[in-house]
Image (cartoon, grey):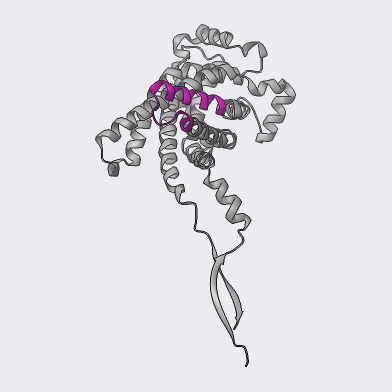
Amino acid sequence: MSASRTETIVVVDAKPTLRETVIPTVLGSMAVRSFLAGTLTGVCSTFLFQPLDLVKTRIQSQLVAGVPQSAITSFKVIPIVTQILRQENIFGLWRGTVPSLFRTVPGVGIYFTSIHIMQEMAGPGRTSTETMLIGVASRVMASLSVLPFTVIKARYESGLFQYSSVFGAFKSTVMTEGFRSLYSGIIPTLLRDAPFSGIYLMFYEMLKSRIKSHLPESNWTPVTHFSAGLAAGLLASIVTHPFDVIKTQIQLTSDPRQRRLLTSARSIWARNGMRGYFAGLFPRIARRTLMTATSWTVYEQVIRSIGLLDGPKRKVPVRLTSVS
């Protein structure tokens, strides 16, 4: 009696590959997703609003050059833009984009990741004070991480330094002024960024909750995200702007004696009075409010979208042979 052979095709789990184990695990982390979403918003907002940041820095750099208060037009936007277009063409408005990307992309990623982690730790029933403290702590960590790039960015944009590359700027700054110069302006930077983020996040969450309570979920669109971001960014920008002026002046000076907070503040007052503390206010308000509103709008939409990253487990056919 002869044995007959039959073949049966069954589907079993294949041995998972690196792509199917490590990558989904990494991408499955909400902290990683927050960082990736934050870096994406950083790239978008940097390219969109770099001209506003450049104009703001150019206006504030005149304080270092000692422009007196009587030169009223020097603090206006149109003359600065006209000068840039005449001397550097339209692409000059994007001067400093590379160091801005070095600063903004990881900075925004760290910022949103920190916010996500601390919000998870605090839980859903957060008070306004807790929300503000989360914003402050997140911005402090992000600002300290990318401060050297902030210094180089300010110098690139000011037009007072002639750098050929980001690496050349770092090398020149460290060789002529020491490594500590890369952290110049750390106190006014934190006094500007920490309150801004705390105030912004508190009002953003309050406005977002209020709008959501009056609108069905289907109507909670990016337009309302953007509106809440604009309103929160406007208030936060005005309150923290004097520290932005002081920060820029400290980072642009080569004299270590002029890098003290009170020394810089007094010199601005002596030359320009109260007006000096609000130099470049309009382009900063425009950039900061639009940038933060855009960042949070893009971030919220990306976070929703990347929930679909996990794919199904792969199945492969295996041929089994049985003998009967």
Residue 152 seen from this side: yes
Q: Main secondary structure of the magenta part?
A: helix
Residue 79 in percent (x, y) is at 45, 26
Residue 127 highlighted magenta (yes or no): yes
- Residue 58: x and y in percent read 52, 25
Instruction: Quarter of the image for the N terminus: give it.
Output: bottom right
| Whether residue 83 can be seen here | no
Which residue is most to the bottom?
A: 1
Q: Magenta segment: does it hold 218?
A: no
**What residue is at 62 percent from the left and 61 percent from the top?**
15
Left or right of residue 166, residue 71 in this image: left
The residue stretch that appears in magenta = 119-142
Judge from the rendering whether residue 199 lies leftward or rightward of residue 320; answer left or right: left
284 versus 5 height, above or below: above
Q: Quadrant of the C terminus?
A: bottom right
In this picture, is 316 found above or below 126?
A: below
Number of numbered discs overlaid on the protein picture: 0
Q: Residue at x 50, y 21 (%)?
A: 194
Q: Is residue 133 left or right of residue 258?
A: left
